[in-house]
Amino acid sequence: VRWEKRCYFAEVETDKLLDAIARLAAVFGEIHLSTITATPVEDAVELSYIFWVYSEKKLLVVKVRVPKKELRVASLVSLIPGALLYEGEAHDLVGVMFEGNPLMSRHVVLSDDIPEEDKPLAR
């Protein structure tokens, strides 16, 4: 974890995400997931998990790069139930499959008449 201005930043590998979030929560105490962003970059999608750290009154940003050839990452729902809709939104718009999230089989923010394979922000 590194400190920059008013934020902590951490970058983790996809297979270490759940463990990293659990450890950070243990270190910082209560953390609140504010949002998840999904940004296509070159041959990957960069996920930024943005947390509010109550004890520090600072943001914590955890970044994960998910290769476009295998857009799968573990869902945070088992640790943070509030991740459900944020992950659903990233799935609808960019195509990341959050393994363990029950919303992966339906649209969350897109209309039901849009084909499942059409990801408007994945281009």
Image (spheres, helix red, strand yellow):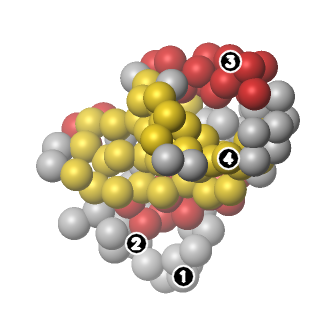
Q: Position of residue 28 (x, y in %)?
A: 75, 27
Residue type, label 4: Lys
Residue position for label 1: 111
Indicate the quadrant containing the C terminus: top left, top right, bottom left or bottom right. bottom left
Whole-number angstrom distance, CA of label 4 to CA of label 1: 36 Å
Q: Position of residue 40 (x, y in %)?
A: 28, 55
Whole-number angstrom distance, CA of label 3 to CA of label 4: 17 Å
Q: Position of residue 63 (x, y in %)?
A: 44, 38
Q: Earlier in the sequence, mark 1 or mark 3?
A: 3
Callout 1 environment at 10 Å: few (<14), some (14 to 19), or many (20+)?
few
Is 40 positioned to the left or the right of 29 in the image? left
The answer to whether 87 is drawn above or below residue 115 in the figure is: above
Residue type, label 1: Ser
Q: Residue at x 82, y 37 (%)?
A: 55
Residue position for label 4: 58
Labelled pair 1, 3 in contact (Cβ < 8 Å): no
Callout 2 environment at 10 Å: few (<14), some (14 to 19), or many (20+)?
few
Q: Callout 4: helix, strand or loop?
A: strand
Q: Position of residue 51 (x, y in %)?
A: 66, 46
Q: Is residue 94 visible?
A: yes
Residue position for label 2: 115
Residue position for label 3: 23
